[in-house]
Amino acid sequence: MKITTKEVRTAVRLLDEIIKEYKEEHPSKKRNWKTYEHQHAERVATAFRELKPFAQKAVASLQTTRSSERGRKRKLSLEQKVLVLLLKHLVKKSNRDMAHMLILFSLLTDVSVSYKSIERLYSDHEVQLAIHNLHMLILQKKNITTTDSSGDGTGYAISVRQHYSSEAQKLKQAIKKSSQQRKQSKRRKYIYSFEIIDLKSRLYLGCGTSFKSEKEAFLKAIDMVQQTRITMKSLRLDRYYSGQTTITFCRNKFENTKVYLIPKKNATIKGSWEWKRMLHAFLHTTKPYLQEYYKRNQSESAFSEDKRRTGWTIAQRKVERVDTANTLTMLWHNLYWLAPI
């Protein structure tokens, strides 16, 4: 059945009414708090029970050598470095506060380092490798080989005085100002973050960060998922990515990936067959299409969960340290969702 550009644009204009009708037919389910609290407790227990064994396996698979034996003897083993960084990220303490906490713990563990040593862990290459291994081990534990996924972006403030959503709103208002004022308003006030989540297990498959744009963070997240060699059957993205180039890009990265997008108001049927097939499904099976598309709500709820757990800010400033901090957020999310759903 053929479709026309006029039909697609008419459907997009009527989309608000269709969505309203769809939501009335699919009311959100009320949460069973008794079941929720039990599941949450189980997730917490599983996360902390699996944390150290995973860290040990992640470190054991690495073989590193020092180019020189000169310098101070290391106070922390690689496993301890990984655990210290993960725990510091979870308790949301500053480097100095975490160093003070380790002094208290040293009564039991003999671990005591300065706050500068903790900050350096974010750019320690061995730690970064171990963290990557830990991520891969978690995905293997859940036996994820294929995925129906969703992707979305958010932001983290780099100062406790700023909040991502309020700063983003200010940036939108700054569009009317001069280009120089816009550049000042964009200057490293927050960090873009993008995560791709597996809808079935609710585990993150990949993440990326950027000081420049959400698109750059998206590209990094896609590359990370590609490295896992997981077959991506489908992907859902918001309207920022609603263009033919997104479908072409995803098809080049992952063969036979079905991409769910909401067309823009000026959408046209001109383009690849994959683009035409998506528009055909959107036009002639709108409600089933929306049912699939709105599974991406899991991405938004995951962001809310992450920020309540590990905070709304990233205190690091260097690019590699920001990447490490964001990866730690991803790891804690995945550790909490290791328990059976």
Image (cartoon, rainbow, N blue to C red):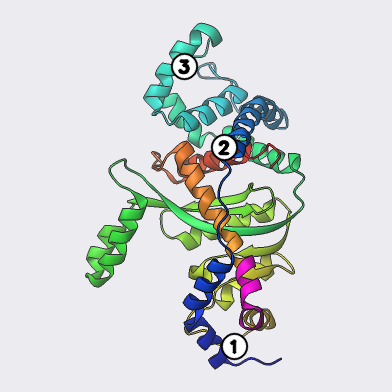
Q: Is residue 248 visible?
A: no
The residue shown at (40%, 39%) is 316
Judge left or right: residue 139 versus residue 244.
Answer: right
The residue shown at (66%, 30%) is 46
Residue 223 in the image: above or below residue 5: above
Identify the residue under disc 3. 102
Dot 3: what SS?
A: helix
> Mark 3: few, some, or many residues within 10 Å (few <14, many ≥20)?
many
Judge left or right: residue 265 versus residue 67.
Answer: left
The residue shown at (49%, 57%) is 153
Kindly identify the amino acid type of the residue bearing the numbered disc 2.
Trp
In magenta, the rendered stretch is 281-292
Q: CA distance from mark 1 to mark 2?
A: 42 Å
**284 in magenta:** yes
Q: Is residue 67 visible?
A: yes
* Mark 3 or mark 2, whichever is nearer to me: 2
Identify the residue under disc 1. 269
